[in-house]
Amino acid sequence: MALFLGLTIAANAAPPSYSVTDLGLVTAVVGISNNDEVLAYDAGGVALYRKDGKIRQLDLLPKLPTTCSFQPWEIPFQLIAGGINQHGVVVFDVHPFQSQSPNCIVTYSDGALQFQTTLGTGGFATGINDAGQIVGQVTDTVGLVGFGPECDFNNGGDYIDAVAINDSEQILGNDSGGPMLCTNGIWQTIPLPKGPANNMVATAMNEEGDVVGYGFTQPSRVILYSNSTSRYLETFPGGANPAPQSINVHGQIVGTSGDVTASVNFLYDAGKMYALTPLISATDPYKNVVMELSGSASINDAGVIASAGTDQSGALHLYLLTPIR
């Protein structure tokens, strides 16, 4: 009876509600730390946004050329954001526009830059954990191949890319056969759930080793791998082709859903899938300002969501959604 009541309460639980902070104009969200710092792209390149409104434009850091040992003729350069860890340490790579110099991988934290490595002209970082370990792609004779600690990305001749790394040094990747998870140096294939999907692309992983991605179906379906089991997640009305982008330690997932004509952001929470925009509190001043949360999104372990969305003029902003307790 207690179990039945518990299931009834969970099924009828009220959806979460959020207050909104507008952090400014962006083009895409990369990630959010547990300190509510957001790594994003804007008109100036790659920037770090803080909840207090301060913005650090990483492309303009004065010590960046010397950190990467670039010559004056190799400036200007392009930054590609790789990720942000729970403490707000950012990894990105730098490539000069006018030369074939190898990409320079750099971390940034509290005003300090630190050179990491070079990865060839096509290499780039894709993630960083709290210990500062970095994963990404490196240019090889066969093309782009994943890199990261302990794991061999040439797995029997099937080259694995690198998606994410957690604090247990688990690395998430994809190869031609689908998603792979490396634990203690050993790769395992993430199984597909029974159903229509014949393959899956993994997109994110949390500190528990839970993996989320989407299966190749018509329309696509969100797949969650947790406790050695994969399963399809439900969709929501109008939520076609969901693409998950981030999962936190509590299993909350955010992403986008839609097609080439229109898209919305979604939240998966406590077994339910929701469109994100309607979850803004009815009493929040931004309730009628945010027209649609429909861009890239990320969620931290406190449940704070960084989402790109349009205002009434159609401009794309970075909105911070804080759960209302």
Image (tube, grey):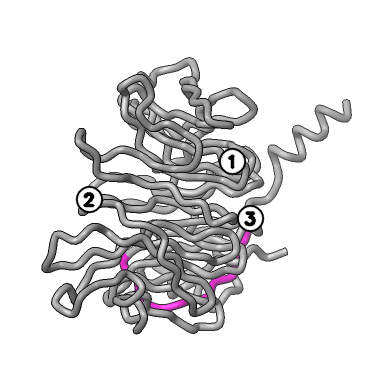
User: Is residue 314 visible in the rendered structure shown here?
Assistant: no
Q: Quadrant of residue 174?
A: top left
Q: Is residue 217 shown left or right of residue 89?
A: left
The magenta segment:
16-27
Marks 3/2: CA–CA distance = 32 Å
- Kindly identify which residue carries mark 3: 301
Label 3 is placed on what type of residue? Answer: Asp
Residue at the disc numbered 2: 122
Tell whether position 18 is magenta: yes
The image shows residue 295 at horizontal and vertical percentages of 36, 58
Q: Earlier in the sequence, mark 3 or mark 1?
A: 1
Label 3 neighbour load within 10 Å: few <14, some 14-19, many 20+: many
Q: Position of residue 195 (x, y in %)?
A: 44, 17
To which residue does mark 1 refer?
272
Left or right: where 72 falls relative to 79: left
Give whichever of 252, 315 is nearer the camera: 252
What secondary structure do most residues of the magenta stretch adopt? Answer: strand
**Label 1, label 2: how many angstroms apart (C-alpha)?**
40 Å
Residue at the extreme right: 1
Residue placed at 45% from the left, 51% from the top? 127
Q: Nearer the viewer, mark 3 or mark 1?
A: 3
Say if residue 58 shows up in the picture. yes
Q: Which mark is residue 145?
A: none
Do residues under tags 3 and 2 come within 8 Å of each other at their CB atoms?
no
Picture residue at 39% right of the left edge, 65% below the top: 309
Q: Mark 2: few, some, or many residues within 10 Å (few <14, many ≥20)?
A: some
